[in-house]
Image (spheres, rainbow, N blue to C red):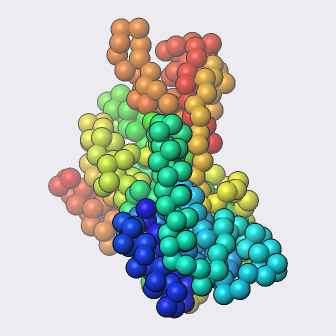
Amino acid sequence: MKVLIGGKRTNATQAMRKTLSSQGCEVQESDGPAGYLEYLRDHPRPDVALIVQPNEAWMHALRTTIEHIYVIGLYPRLTGRRCLQAWNIGVDDIAMLSACPEEIAGRVAALSRIRSWVHTLGDNFTKPDFDPDEFDAVRGLDALMASSLDNMLGTDNMEVELLPTLPELAYGAEMPLLLVDELTELSVGIGITTAEVDPLMVLLFGEPEEPELVVDSVKELTNICGGALKRKVLEEGKTFSMGLPRETTQPEPPLLRCWAMSSDNIELIAWVRVRVQQPSRLCVENLSEGMVLSQPIYNNRGLMLLPGGAVLTERTIVRLERWLGGNALVEITRAA
Amino acid sequence: MAQTILIVDDSRMFRRRIRKALEDAGHHVIEAGDGLEALEKLTGTLPALIICDLNMPRMNGLEFLEELQRRSDLDIPIIMLTAEVQPSTINQAKRLGAKGWLVKPVSPPALLNLVTHIAQGQG
């Protein structure tokens, strides 16, 4: 088991580290959520986190991965108020900081046993179809997006801050990126608050502009960030099908992560979310632009007309209607 | 040498920025928001060069290239300017006649270099 010990280092946490290590656990330590997130960029996530007096910032950092990390809160004293607070922020279990290290190791071992037992039910039960954090590109997405925005806007080294929630946006857009075989849609988004509308337009065009151009600009920034992610993931052997950017100021929850990206003269909000996209079958006449083919389409001589992952345009739909007829069923994933 | 250049991109923001860079270099620019609109524009004016996005609504960049390939009267060099670099897509675009490929966001000097290069017949 991979175990994270987080929070202020004490004799008690050092004793836990020694005991857990001696029982074969891989133990890492981090003094705060920021350090943990930094660590997470280049390392796999822990299975269990032992956190000294966890707070919302810690819980937020621990919930930025798709797979659940079991959190045990360690407290100097266990009062009703502390237990309630732990419950409210989503801590899975609690223990005294002064608890015997063997007891904590016992709880971790029990989790390990449950995990092994669950694994006997098969990979489909325990493994998500797609874990975005397996990709360096996704783990480092904040830096990748900030650098793409720097290139586009001419800003210099945008600073990135992880946000607990998405602020209210005046304009926003997201780019759906589909992994057809994994039935997964990963969307990257860019938004701006009301206060940042004019600064963004001034940065791009030298003066404030009409709302239509603001929407267009945010969509294009999203397109550029989506393209950067697609290129980076390609280096890791996966190919995303890129849809068309869509306008949204309220992306559907849950968000995997969201950030404020700021330079001297602008602050943009960026986010990423992941959802499972089951394919569905539609008649050709009901297809619409931006949908992605789940399967390649062949003609009756076995010649491939369109590959799986192709993003439909108006023109492609007209051609499909001509090739197959309006009533033919096509398997698609809804990206738009 | 000043050229007439057609920019095909669904992003007004991008068209405007590219237009500025090209006009500052003395070129004349016409715009289209997708492949279909570009085909309409080509009935009126014949540009010396086309700069075309890949992901667009209605008719995307590859479909536009296919259409141009069918039209023997239109022998215009095309630079693809897109956020993607999937090798199979680049190869397909090359087979369909694209002369160059630039990745967004592109710097004005890089764009102008390629425009000059292709306009001089070195693409």
Residue A67 vertical placement versus B13 (above, below) = above
Percent across and percent down for residue A314 are 57, 32
Q: In the rendered view of the protein, which quadrant contains the N terminus of chain A? A: bottom left
Residue at left offset 51%, top offset 22%: A319
The residue lying toward the viewer, choosing from A321 and A303, is: A303
The image quarter in which residue B1 lies: bottom left
The residue lying toward the viewer, choosing from A101 and A162, is: A101
Name the residue furthest top: A300
Residue A231 vertical placement versus B90 (above, below) = below
Residue A292 in view: yes
The residue lying toward the viewer, choosing from A140 and B122, is: A140
Name the residue furthest left: B122
Q: In the rendered view of the protein, which quadrant contains the C terminus of chain A? A: top right
Residue at left offset 82%, top offset 80%: A81
Residue at left offset 38%, top offset 55%: A233
Q: Number of numbered discs present?
A: 0
Residue B102 vertical placement versus A95 (above, below) = above
The image quarter in which residue A42 lies: bottom left
Percent across and percent down for residue B29 are 46, 59
Percent across and percent down for residue A63 are 60, 65
Residue at left offset 32%, top offset 54%: A236
Percent across and percent down for residue A245 are 58, 52
Residue A213 in view: no
